[in-house]
Image: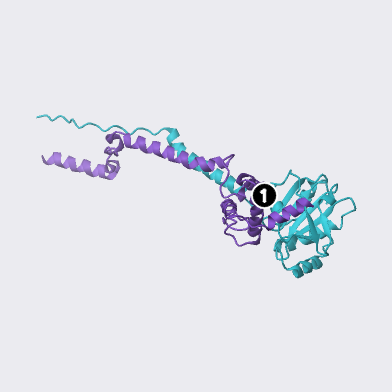
Chain colours: A purple, B cyan
Amino acid sequence: MLLLVLGWALASAPLSPAQEAQAQQIGRTIRCPVCQGLPITESTSDLSHQMMRELRSQVQQGRGADQIIQYFAARYGDTVLLNPPRRGINLLLWLAPLLALLLGGLWLLSYLRRPAGAAAPLPSTPGPDPDDEDPYLRQVRAVSSARKARDA
Amino acid sequence: MTTSNSTPTPAAPRPSSPLRRVLPPLIAAVLVVLLGLGLLRSNGQQEGGPLVGKAAPNFTLTTLDGGTLSLASLKGRPVVLNFWASWCVPCRSEAPLLRELSERQTAGGLAVVGVVFSDKDLKAVRQFVGEYGLAYPSLLDPKLDTAINYGVSGVPETFFVDPQGVVRGYDQGGLTRERLTAGLQTIGVKF
C-alpha cells in the first residue's frame, strides 16, 4: 500500500528541469513505433505520448538512460532505437562507411602515385587497315599497280 | 640514304588480372544480397517478436463490462492475447477466426483474451464485439501501458502464451487460419 502511494506520489510530481531535459534527450533516441522515423518527442501519436509518459516516470524513478533504452528495446526490438546499437550486424552499418573511405583513399593514393606515363592512356597502336581486309579493294589496288608497272 | 626508324614501339597494354575483372561485380553482388537480406528481415511478417521466449508481462485491466482480469489469473492455461481496435481493418478479417477459436475454450484450457489498443470510441468497440459475437473478454488499456509492455506498434498483434506464462509465438498483421494454427502449435493447442 505504501509502495502504491509512493508510486502515485512520484508519478504525479512534476519533473525537475534537469530531469525533463534528460527525458527529452533519451526520448530523441527512441523511435515512434507507429511513425516514419520520428522520435517519440516529436510524434503526436497517442502511443508516443504514452511512451514519453512511461519514460518520464522512469527518469523520475532514477533509472539511467541505458536502462530506459534497454526497457524499450526489450519490448519493441532494436528497431525502436534511432541510434542502432554498435553490435552484431549493426556493426556493419557503422564500419562499412569507414571501410569504404579507407579503401577509396588507398585506391586514390595508389592512382596519384602511379608514374605519369602509366597513368596516361596508352597511344593506340595502328591496327591493320580495314581496307586491306576488303577483297575488292585488294583487287583494285592490284590492277592499279599492274597498270602503273606497264606504263612505266 | 637510309633512314633508321627509331620510333619506340609502345608497350603492349598489360592484361588485367582476373581478380580485377571479377572484384567489382562481386562487390556489387554482395551488396545486393545484403540489401535483399536486410529487406527480408524488416518485412512486416515477423516470425518472432522480441518477447518470444520471455515471460509474458503481467497486466490487470478492466473488461468492457467493468470487471477486471489479470494474466496471472490465467496461469496454467494457454492464452491467445490479441490486441485490436475497432478502426483496424485487418482486425475485422481475423475476428471471425478468433470467435471460432474462443468457442473451443474450456475451463482450465485455452483462454482467448482481447486488449483494445488506442481506441477511445467505446461505442464502436462494443459494436465491434457485438457484430462479430466475440464471446471472450475484451480489456481496456486506456494508458496503453500493456500495449507498451508488449511492444505493440500496430494492430492486430497476437501473442501466444504457454501455460507457464512464457510467450511462445507472435503474429502481426492479421491472422489467417494457417497462421493461427501455427501460433497455436507453439503453445500446444490444436485448431
Of A128 and B143, the residue lying toward us = B143
The residue singled out by tag 1 in the image is: A61
Q: Identify which residue is drawn at 23% across, 44% down.
A: A140
Q: Quadrant of residue B91?
A: bottom right
Report the chain holding disc 1: A
Between B80 and A122, the one lying in front of the other is: B80
Percent from the top left, x then y, of residue B73? 85, 51
Residue at 39 percent across and 38 percent down: it is: A105
Which amino acid lies under the numbered mark 1 shown in the image of this protein? Gln
Residue B178 in sight in this render: no
- Quarter of the figure that contains the N terminus of chain B: top left
Circle 1 Cα neighbour tier, 10 Å, few/some/many (<14 / 14–19 / ≥20): few
From this viewpoint, is residue B92 visible?
yes
| Residue depicted at 46% across the width and 40% down the height | A98
Which quadrant would residue B15 be assigned to in this image?
top left
Query: Closer to the camera, B79 or B11?
Result: B79
Figure label count: 1
Residue at image location 61% in from the left, 49% down from the top: A79
Where residue B29 sits in the image (x, y, percent)? 51, 42
Q: Position of residue A59 (x, y in %)?
A: 63, 50
x, y percent for residue B30: 53, 41
Residue situated furthest right in the rendering:
B107
Residue B113 or residue B120, whichever sits in front: B120
